[in-house]
Image: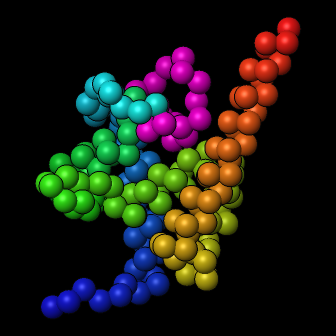
Amino acid sequence: MSKGKLSTSSVAEGIIATVDACRCVVKAFASGRVTTVICHGMRDADLRYAPRFARDLPADTIGVKYTTGHIVEYLQMLGKDTSVDIGNGRRAPSRWMLLSMLLLEMWELELRDQESDIIFIAEGRIGFTLNALLGTCRKQYEKHRALVEKQQEATAILELCK
């Protein structure tokens, strides 16, 4: 039996369920009920600090370090596979996971409106499918990162001028 295209309502339910699962796992990391693997050698750009979702935190932030990969591993232990095979026995987070973490991060940074997004996803509005939303969010986040980097450069220049 071949995999068919998911219905709009199935995609909406999947996105919302994955967002909720990510929220729950990050809360568990933050509470200490679930431990993460020590993040040696991880790129700073990949690290987050529970209970937060955003990667744009100062380095001195106190919190439990985690990555999207840690969430994937925990959900796999619960029997929920949220990764895809990328060859050589390696796995990467699925598009569902990437979108969920990106949405949570953007909502926390107030780059997108959570309530509107949830409503539009549930209604299956055009532009709120898995691929379309992932593309839109990635572009918005890249613009945000570019702006943050410019602000950091400007701050560094001002500090040098003092």
Residue at the (51%, 41%) spot, across then down: 53
* Coordinates of residue 118 in the picture (x, y in percent): 58, 66
Give the answer, above or below, for where 159 lies relative to 82: above
Q: Does the image show residue 30?
A: no
Main SS type for the magenta part?
loop
Q: Quadrant of residue 136?
A: bottom right
* Residue depicted at 62% across the width and 60% down the height: 139
Viewer-nearest residue: 9 or 58? 58
- Pick the quarter of the image with the C terminus: top right
Would you say residue 136 sits in the magenta stretch?
Answer: no
Q: Position of residue 38 (x, y in %)?
A: 28, 26
The residue most toward the right is 162
**Near-viewer residue (77 or 99):** 99
Query: Is 47 part of what is drawn in magenta?
Result: yes
Q: Residue at x 30, y 41 (%)?
A: 70
Residue 93 occupies quadrant: bottom left
Give the color scheme: rainbow, by chain, secondary structure or one colour: rainbow
The x, y position of residue 39, in whole percent, is 32, 28
Rendered image quadrant of residue 1:
bottom left
Please state if 36 lies on the left or on the right of 22 as rendered: left
Front residue of 131 and 50: 131
Q: Is residue 52 left or right of residue 156?
A: left
Q: Position of residue 2 (x, y in %)?
A: 20, 89
Q: Residue at x 54, y 21 (%)?
A: 59
Instruction: Say if residue 83 shows up in the picture.
Output: yes
Q: Which residues are magenta?
A: 45-64
* Image-based side of 33 in relation to 147, left or right: left
The extreme top residue here reads: 162
Labels in figure, total? 0
